[in-house]
Amino acid sequence: MGSGMAGRIFRQLLSFAVTLIMTFIGLTAVTFLIGRLTRIDPVLAVVGDKASKQVYDQTFHAMGLDKPLIVQYALYVKRLISGDFGISVLTSQPVLSDLLRVFPATFELATLAIIIGVAAGIPAGVLAGARKGRWADHVVRVVGLFGYSVPVFWLGLVGLFVFYGKLGWVSGTGRLDVFYEDIVTPRTGIILIDSAIDGDWDIFRNAFSHLILPAAILGFFSLAYIARMTRSFMITQLSQEYVTTARVKGRSYWGAVWRHAFPNIMVPLITVIGLSYASLLEGAVLTETVFAWPGLGLYITRALFNGDMNAVLGGTILVGAVFIGVNLVSDLLYRVFDPRLRGA
Amino acid sequence: MTQSLSHWLLDEAPGSRRQAVLGSLYRGLLAILSNPPGLVGLVIVTVLVLIAIFAPLLDRGISPIAQDLGNRLAQPSAAHWFGTDELGRDIYSRTLYGSRVTLTIVALVSVLVAPIGLAVGTLAGYLGGWVDIVLMRITDVFLAFPRLVLALAFAAALGPGIENAVIAISLTAWPPYARIARAETITIARSDFIQAVLLQGASTWRILLRHIVPLCLSSVIVRLTLDMAGIILTAAGLGFLGLGAQPPTAEWGAMVSAGRDVILDQWWVSTIPGVAIFLVSLGFNLLGDGLRDVFDPKETS
């Protein structure tokens, strides 16, 4: 019995590892191919267009570009594993250190956004599912439809126009007002946390007033998705017989909703939240461009326009890796929390 | 006359293949018409197509690329219904012509994505074994990627432009179709009529192309309609970042981007093309939801 259990866990870990490795190979193969597809000559990017033919050929050879594609790919993966993502043409820094520098800004934005999305989306979805066909349901449906149809970059601009330009409730673009910049000691890179550690509440307030609008706009998109999924899970659960049984035994309707049906939808919701957190990273690319938010998205788009392929591909790998990582973690949590899947 | 036509279309025992096909299309149309959100969606999409076709008649004689630098960033007025942009171009006219770009992208992506997805999915589902494993692993890898970022990287490598945006979006959009086609194929392949065709000596290709693909088509088309909004938003996002249609072509995403610097003073420059993007993706979302309700009652809740 015990060994059977251990064997199952081992098999699960093994299949987990195989999935991880396969996806990593796929991820790097795709970025490698994109790197080959580009019209930007990688040799010229290093030696410049004034180099002699001899220097060009030497570099061509030194970069391994005369080797078979599969060997080049192997070298590429080897470099990536050792943390060498190349040098960014734009910043003249190693791409990896650039990525580590800009990532906290995106993390801060996406995390606040998912908190907003979960805090508003789950209650809204439960309400809509429990009051199916009533006005609350229609409101949630319309909000969801709006979220699925509106371009995020446009909503960001309109938000800036209304809440910053007209009402003045929030601060404009960037992470901080100019005169606050470079004052906080970057411990975590997350300004809200860093300024709180320093006890500098002026900076904290300023950072928050910059953060809240982009986070609310990104959060709105995960709200739309989370509410829609919660609603449909809730409807499925409420039609089950155990809910009727609970009601027959004298449970109030909302008691049955929250105490009986809700615990059953928490597990699938983990996956939904994971998926929407990962897709926030993607929405962040456009949102960061609109709000001049110095995170991963802005880094990638800036690199894009300067033909800085190392930076673009490094950023793509990081986003892809986080995306895959979040998906795997939510898959794992799903298995941990759902007793039916423990043995499967 | 109309009575007999509708009888002919709704005949439970159609006499010809044509009658059967037309009949099922007619039933679908009736079902969509009885689904209010779906109907709204259908109307929006139809209007979009009409605008794209008749843009030269509707543009009030103003070219979408005619510049008038003396009259730049003008407010909406009788002369310029939606105002003018930073080069004095008429935003109303540009918004009309922008529908052509959007429709082109949507059409090209559909034409590319559906066959790729069908080919991969039906092959994997029908042949099974290692073909299935390899093809589905590849699908999973593409599915694991964040779509916009991957499209961004492709577009960056290929260079800006509509064709490359289409290729970039298609490369990232096909995996769900492969998944759907595979799932359908697995169910269909087990049914008796496939065994019957097989016993009659039909080749694998014949079975796939003549018997399995046609049956997968309806779910692929429903999914495609549901995805349209996503495709439009991705395309607009690429355009916004400058990777879509190149100037002076009127493209909604690029038009929103052009108004960014003046959003606080001349709000209409960005707002109007944004509303256009919103309305069109809303239309496709409503139509897709309606089609799903009609063709797949299981999902209705």
Image (cartoon, coloured by chain):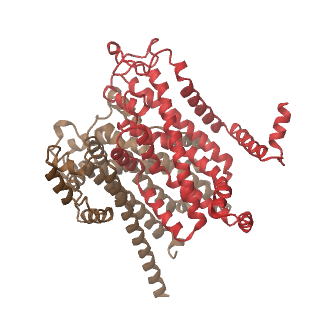
Relative height, residue B289 to residue B126 (above, below)? above
Identify the residue at horizontal 50%, vertical 60% (top origin). Answer: A266
User: From the viewer's perspective, is residue A134 above or below residue A27?
Assistant: above
Q: Is residue B212 left or right of residue A212?
A: right
In the shown orientation, is residue A146 left or right of residue A99?
right
Count every numbered label the image shows and give the total.
0
Q: Which chain is red?
A: B
Residue name at image x 31 percent, y 38 percent: A291
Q: Position of residue A162 (x, y in %)?
A: 37, 29
In the rendered structure, the answer to whether residue A29 lies left or right of residue A339 reads left
In this view, the residue in front, A48 or A127, is: A48
Residue B255 located left or right of residue B173: left
Q: Is residue A162 above or below residue A18?
A: above
Quarter of image, res A78? bottom left
Q: Nearer the viewer, residue B7 or A261?
A: B7
Rendered colour, chain A: brown
Residue B142 screen position, x and y as percent = 44, 57
Q: Nearer the viewer, residue A319 or B298?
A: A319
- Residue at 86%, 35% in the rendered image: B4
Quadrant (top left, top right, bottom left, bottom right) of the N terminus of chain B: top right
Q: Residue A64: where, in percent of width, then height?
A: 23, 61
> Can residue A88 be seen in this snapshot?
no
Could you tell me if residue A77 is visible in this image? yes
Percent coordinates x, y for residue B260 in the rendering? 33, 30
